[in-house]
Amino acid sequence: MSSTVDLAKLHIDDFTPHQHAGFEMQAADRVVDLKLAKVEPAGNSGRPGGAFSLLFVGPKGAWLPQAIYPVRHPALGVIEIFLVPIGPLGDGNGYQAIFT
């Protein structure tokens, strides 16, 4: 059994070294390969470590609905992230997560 990461403890610096790295999102019926396309600060929300956003690119095709998905990375573990489809990004489907 793998434990999930505490979202409150995540900081933008946890993701910056993994920009352009591969992540795996567990959808209801399959695993979807994602690439972390962009890591950006998102202002001062009062959140410890500051607010930030992550942009992921998934494969072209049917969009996954906005929802909380388990996202796995070898160094970061499993993170339950609320992902929102944002439209085409690069050569695939874009998904955004915002930590505030």
Image (spheres, rainbow, N blue to C red):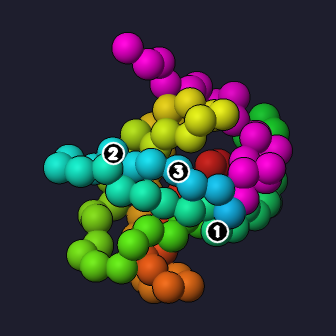
Examine the rendering and report whether any part of residue 42 can be seen.
no
Tag count:
3
Q: Mark 3 points at which residue?
A: 23
Q: Element at badge 2?
A: strand
Q: Mark 1 or 3 closer to N-term?
A: 3
Q: Which amino acid does label 2 sit on?
A: Gln
Pointer 2 local density, CA inside 10 Å: few below 14, some 14–19, many at least 20: some
Q: Which residue is drawn at 51% across and 70% down?
A: 57
Q: CA separation, marks 1 and 3?
A: 11 Å
Q: Which residue is drawn at 62% across and 49% down?
A: 99
Q: Mark 2 or 1 closer to N-term?
A: 2
Measured as percent of width and height from the top left, residue 50 is found at 79, 46
Q: Quadrant of the N terminus?
A: top left
- State the image quarter where residue 39 is shown: bottom right
The question of residue 3 being in magenta is answered with yes
Q: Name the residue under label 1.
A: 37
Q: What stretch is highlighted in magenta?
A: 1-19
Q: Name the residue under label 2.
A: 26
- Horizontally, is 77 left or right of 88 in the view? right
